[in-house]
């Protein structure tokens, strides 16, 4: 018989990852992980701007994405203000493009526009949302490594402010299409500076082994010494259908430290100066992409936008001075950092079970040979990988709380799982929840504003959840949840 041990509540379970400690108060909301108007009411229920989760469940059902409109707007403004302040003396300010792929619907496009930001899109479908919302095309950018001719025509029909071109072949295609229309396409070239930022460090490599962008390494064309990036600059400058605005890069996502952004900025500025010199052209724009990180779990340490903006501005200022060039107009493309923390997903708990898992005996280091087991509780919710694919796709970590009430019960190492037919269907891999969590309780998972609804699927014919926006004490659906009819709609029945 293996020895069975309970969790030692204050020390935590040996099954927990190193970063996860037992919260001193299981009912507390860690401020950096939540929308700023999330709180518990007198009855102990989670509320957003005063609206309780039980009211939200009654009205809209679960699972449900619950988004704070005021929080979205204030994060958008915070980014815009921080970067505009930091770069005011360098290039007059910064254009902030909200990365629509993180979460997009027409309401959000209007918020973005009203807060003075612009919009990044990456497909014809995203352009359709932008058009329906009525944002001027001049404030919209189109990305993508494989744009169709139809998407290019649509971008030109909408008079987009910029098309970010990803390859030489695409550059020629965009230029030819624009020329045939008797127009000039406004183009940025996406370059790969060989800087890859991870959450805690960045790496610099000469060669890129990924699908996006034009390499800046010197041996990436047939011609000795010529980089794919330079080849594209020369081709763009010579094409009558192209107005070359400048250069673009995007070094990764969920990045906390400013160093990688600063290094990429420096590399692109050096390249920009060299191209201006060599081809006698002015490249007035430089886009440094997105990727600013947020807190999903208590140990995540996102930096305030102002700190990142200052670090990037310092490098742009000194590099331009050294090169003797005027700084191009800078733009950035945050997605997650604007929408991620504005939203939590509300689930209803159902089946729970506790398994016992082998681990070294935490109470006795010399007892190494012993087969000791510890409990792990599985709490199933009414959604899962269909509304949050990130744990499956990226091993992403999330957190969760008991939302419909507070509890004084002991913390128990738990795993929040979905209802799909996959054992990998995990929403929150490791979290301490009160041990009295039971079917019918509501759980809330914070930080689900970005890349959750956007990546949602109908796996197992689950209906994709709706999105509710809360503002000034009232809630409204900005995207309705799917119905069974929606699910059957495209089945031709033949
Ligand atoms: C995804 C993406 C972004 C946004 O990334 P976040 O991590 O959400 O800030 C910005 N620019 C480009 C080109 C992207 O592909």
Image: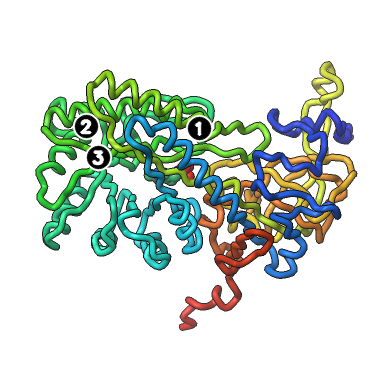
Viewer-side label of 3, 2: 3
Q: Quick one: label 2 or label 1, which is nearer the N terminus?
A: 2
Viewer-side label of 3, 1: 1
Which quarter of the frame holds ligand 1? top left
Residue farthest along the top direction in this orientation: 366
Q: Is residue 144 above or below residue 460?
A: above
Residue under pointer 2? 220
Which quarter of the rendered picture does the N terminus lie within? Answer: top right
State the image coordinates of residue 345 (x, y, percent, origin top left). 65, 55
Other-residue count near label 1 (Cα within 10 Å), few / some / many at <14 / 14–19 / ≥20: some
> How much space separates mark 3 and mark 1, taking CA atoms?
25 Å
Rendered residue at 30%/38% (across/down) = 329
Rendered residue at 64%/55% (across/down) = 384
Specify whether tag 1 is near ligand 1 (CB below 8 Å): no
- The image's mark for residue 246 is 3
Residue under pointer 1? 306
State the image coordinates of residue 353 (x, y, percent, origin top left). 81, 51
Viewer-side label of 2, 1: 1
Q: Secondary structure under badge 2?
A: loop
Rendered residue at 31%/22% (across/down) = 319
State the image coordinates of residue 35 (x, y, percent, origin top left). 64, 47
């Amino acid at each position: 018989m293996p020895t069975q041990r309970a969790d030692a509540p204050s020390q935590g379970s040996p099954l927990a990852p190193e970063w996860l400690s037992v919260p001193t108060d299981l009912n507390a909301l860690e401020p950096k992980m939540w929308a700023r108007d999330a709180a518990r009411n007198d009855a102990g229920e989670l509320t957003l701007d005063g609206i309780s989760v039980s009211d939200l469940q009654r009205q809209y059902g679960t699972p449900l994405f619950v988004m704070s409109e005021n929080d979205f707007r204030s994060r958008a403004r915070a980014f815009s203000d921080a970067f505009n302040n930091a770069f005011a003396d360098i290039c007059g300010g910064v254009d902030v493009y909200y990365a629509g792929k993180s979460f997009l619907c027409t309401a959000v496009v209007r918020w973005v526009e009203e807060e003075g930001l612009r919009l990044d899109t990456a497909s014809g479908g995203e352009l359709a949302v932008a058009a329906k919302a009525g944002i001027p095309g001049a404030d919209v950018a189109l990305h993508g490594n494989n744009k169709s001719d139809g998407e290019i025509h649509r971008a030109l029909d909408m008079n987009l402010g910029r098309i970010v071109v990803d390859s030489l072949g695409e550059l020629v295609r965009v230029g030819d299409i624009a020329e045939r229309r008797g127009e000039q396409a406004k183009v940025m070239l996406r370059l790969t500076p060989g800087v890859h930022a991870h959450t805690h460090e960045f790496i610099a490599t000469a060669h890129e082994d990924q699908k996006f962008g034009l390499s800046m390494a010197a041996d990436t064309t047939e011609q000795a010494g010529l980089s794919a990036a330079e080849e594209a600059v020369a081709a763009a400058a010579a094409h009558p259908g192209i107005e070359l605005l400048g250069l673009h890069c995007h070094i990764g996502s969920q990045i906390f430290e400013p160093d990688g952004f600063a290094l990429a900025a420096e590399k692109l500025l050096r390249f920009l100066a060299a191209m201006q010199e060599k081809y006698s052209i002015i490249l007035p724009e430089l886009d440094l992409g997105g990727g600013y990180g947020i807190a999903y779990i208590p140990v995540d340490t996102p930096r305030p936008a102002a700190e990142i903006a200052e670090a990037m501005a310092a490098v742009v200022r000194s590099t331009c001075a050294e090169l003797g060039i005027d700084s191009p107009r800078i733009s950035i493309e945050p997605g997650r950092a604007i929408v991620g923390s504005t939203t939590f997903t509300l689930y209803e708990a159902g089946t729970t079970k506790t398994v016992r898992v082998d681990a070294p005996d935490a109470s006795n280091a010399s007892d190494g040979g012993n087969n000791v087991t510890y409990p792990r509780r599985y709490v199933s919710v009414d959604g899962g990988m269909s509304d949050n694919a990130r744990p499956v796709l990226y091993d992403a970590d999330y957190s969760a709380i008991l939302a419909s009430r507070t509890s004084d019960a002991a913390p128990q190492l738990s795993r929040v799982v979905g209802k799909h037919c996959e054992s990998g269907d995990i929403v929150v891999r490791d979290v301490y929840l009160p041990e009295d969590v039971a079917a019918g309780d509501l759980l809330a998972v914070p930080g689900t504003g970005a890349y959750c609804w956007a990546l949602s699927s109908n796996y197992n014919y689950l209906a994709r959840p709706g999105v509710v926006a809360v503002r000034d004490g009232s809630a409204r659906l900005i995207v309705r949840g799917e119905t069974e009819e929606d699910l059957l709609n495209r089945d031709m029945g033949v």
